[in-house]
Image (cartoon, helix red, strand yellow):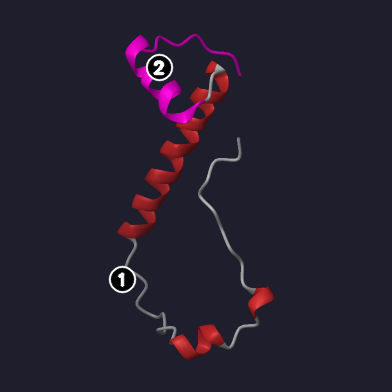
């Protein structure tokens, strides 16, 4: 989708300097992805304690999962 955006020059310069992303489309995309990650985290945190039927996970149970079966996630940008 194409869009015309009015972005504050100083905000754009600060984001470029911090991220080292020079291309404006990539910079806006990275910013939107960061916002989605942040807001998704807030929504997940707001759910804390709302599922009454969950059983606690004990450390022994987690350790018994084979290491190569565990999934590791990174919040680092894919750029």
Element under label 1? loop
Quadrant in the picture for the N terminus: top right
- Between 46 and 27, the residue placed more toward the observer is 27
Tell me residue 15's x, y (percent).
41, 24
- Between 54 and 21, the residue placed more toward the observer is 21
Residue at image coords 39%, 13%:
7
Residue at image coords 67%, 75%:
69
Provide the residue designation for mark 1: 49
Residue 20's place in the image compared with 70, above or below, is above
Q: Distance between the residues labelled 1 and 2?
A: 39 Å
Provide the residue designation for mark 2: 12
Q: Is residue 6 magenta?
A: yes
Q: Which of marks 1 and 2 is in front?
A: 2
Tell me residue 21's x, y (percent).
53, 24
Quadrant in the picture for the C terminus: top right
Q: Does the magenta stretch include residue 8?
A: yes
Pointer 1 or 2: first along the chain: 2
Determine whether, in the image, residue 53 is placed left or right of residue 73: left
CB of mark 1 within 8 Å of CB of mark 2?
Answer: no
Residue 7's place in the image compared with 70, above or below, is above
Quarter-of-image position of residue 2: top right
Element under label 2? helix
Tell me residue 19's x, y (percent).
47, 30
Magenta-colored span: 1-20
């Amino acid at each position: 989708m194409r869009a015309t955006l009015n972005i504050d020059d100083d905000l754009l310069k600060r984001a470029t300097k911090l991220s080292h992303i020079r291309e404006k489309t990539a910079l806006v995309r990275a910013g939107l992805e960061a916002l989605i990650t942040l807001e998704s985290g807030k929504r997940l945190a707001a759910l804390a304690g709302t599922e009454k039927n969950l059983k606690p996970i004990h450390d022994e149970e987690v350790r018994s999962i084979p290491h190569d079966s565990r999934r590791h996630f990174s919040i680092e940008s894919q750029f």
